[in-house]
Amino acid sequence: MALNLDAIGRKIGPVTKEYGWKDAVLYALGVGAGFDELEFVYEKDLKVVPSFAIAVVFEFLSHIASGANINLAGILHGEQDLTMHAPLPVEGKLVTSGKITHMYDLGKDKGAVVVGESTTCDDKGRRLFSSTIRLMARLDGGFNGEASPKVKIGFPDRAPDFEIEDHPSADQPLIYRLSGDIFQLHVDPEFAKMAGFEKPIMHGLCTHGFACRALVKSLIPGEPERMHRLNCRFSRPLYPGDPVKIQIWKTQEGKAVWKVINAKTGETVINNGVFEYGDIPKDEIRFDGRVAIITGAGGGLGKAYALELARRGAKIVVNDLGGARDGSGEGSATPAQKVVDEITAAGGEAVANYDNVATPRGGENIVKTALDAFGTVDIVINNAGILRDKSFMKMEPEHWKAVLDVHLNGAYHVTKPAFAVMREKGYGRIIMTTSAAGLYGNFGQTNYSAAKMGLAGFMNTLKLEGKKYNILVNTVAPLAASRLTEDVLPEELLEKVKPEFVAPMVLFLASDRCEVSGRIYNAGMGCFNRAAVVTGPGTTLGDGTEEPAIEDIAANLSKIAAIKNGKEYFELNEAVADVINAFS
């Protein structure tokens, strides 16, 4: 049996869990609450012990263990980091998604560490909490993997500010396990001995709950909703019935360090504890430390993206040639510089770039501007565009080439050097800009439509090549007022289609909250939906050995053309496999 190293980076979930107030009370009883903490055990004005967040999504933790193929005889909860984004309601439906991020090798006789990260939202999509778990796989080391980084929390050289004594009962695991963790190690004497213990041990997360209660009681009494981080390392097992001391040191306003001592043996059973509290910060998607390149950002959509990304902490390369709508003219520095000035006046960081995306050298220079100014590239928004509308029979080669050079080739010229940087660092977000004209067609825009649909094809392969490097590639089809649409859309509609209504979709796809790749989204006027290439179920004609006749096609066209119960494919091989297997 060996760890499944291929599971690293693979998405887990969504895993859903519904719970009611009785579940919250049962958990509180399982971690020692009683009449002295009535707010946790009585449905009148009920509040939730914050550490319940981990217990209520325990099923997700089991997916990490099974996905990594950990030998369960050697599994222990190593570390737990819980960050609250909003108070946990007393009842509701939770949706959890995440992935295994690392597998560290401690050595053949010492085991391994499996790290999983997850985010849990309510059924309306509001983030409630994030979790990082480190599972000790004591029997799975020796695969020549990366060593685990060492992290140690410093404790003040003085007596703790608070020391709370508590007494888990000899039967405590029997109550706690009803909250979800029914692993045999905590109830079955024979399994416990097989795992190397004299008898069943306390759940680490049960002791974790005792500590959480003590921290809330000491630092934010009566206000558990003000806890926003609880981090710790489980260092030694604790047997049921052994008394504990929770030691707490305040290190600054809103922060404390803590540990749990076995009062019987003096051993530290939970170490490296961090507790942060106060008003939970607004759950805002931020881009602090990220560097974004936005092409065609001197006005319209690009400017809207640049201003909002900068407001949320990103450093911006504002690219705009400053030419006419059809790409003619020598260009001007004014549009890009005005946007940079607006960003810097508001306290943000930005630099201007005036290179033409239509050339390889221009694309390279745009990325070089980001590297010279900010040292890296995290986000590329391919937004630059021109129009040269003509009906097809009047479409001259220069009109065709000019539009493809900016829209399609321009995205290639900028994305290629940026992709190299992203691949090296293992992170990137790339957004292409398509159009309803490309997805559905528009009279007089064959050049524009071809370029815009070409970007969807570009995305479809780049998403595959970027997947293992955490580079996600998505496409937006905006409906917005800009230089390109000012005489295409009716005047009364132009007033309603502000670029700011498109920006939220683009910024989400540019964020680290985004976990999708290869998607196309329509966005405009506050209306958002997804467009996709869907393949209908179709039909098979003949036995696969003789070619069908033209008349067979005519007779079965309705079945061939049916889209109901259609299917999306993520890559070519999936579609080919269905064809190959059609007669199976």
Image (cartoon, rainbow, N blue to C red):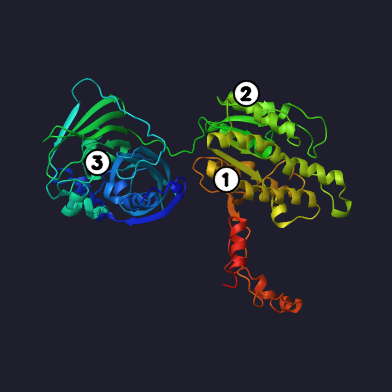
Work out how far the residue at label 2 is from the one at label 3, CA to CA, in angstroms.
47 Å
Residue at the spot of label 3: 208
Q: Is residue 380 left or right of residue 38?
A: right
Give the side of residue 433 with respect to residue 487, left or right.
Answer: left
**Where does the C terminus fall, quadrant-wise?**
bottom right
Report the number of numbered marks.
3
Q: Which of the pair 562/28 is nearer the observer?
A: 562
- Pinpoint residue 125: horizontal percent, then vertical percent: 45, 50
- Callout 3: SS: helix
Say whether residue 63 is left or right of residue 443: left
Please state if 321 lies on the left or on the right of 85 as rendered: right
The residues tagged by marks 1 and 3 sit, at their Cα atoms, a distance apart of 39 Å
Disc with the residue nearer the chain's start (2 vs 3): 3
Tell which tag, 1 or 3, sits nearer the viewer. Answer: 3
Q: Which residue is mark 2?
A: 372
Is tag 1's residue or tag 3's residue first in the polypeptide sequence?
3
Q: Quadrant of residue 538?
A: bottom right
Amino acid type, residue under disc 2 in the picture: Asp
Q: Marks 1 and 2, how far apart in space?
A: 29 Å
| Residue type marked 3 | His
x, y percent for residue 443:
79, 55
- Asked if the residues shown at circle 1 and circle 3 are in contact, with their CB atoms under 8 angstroms apart, the answer is no
Which secondary structure, mark 2? helix
Q: Which mark is residue 505?
A: 1
Disc 1 on helix, strand or loop? helix
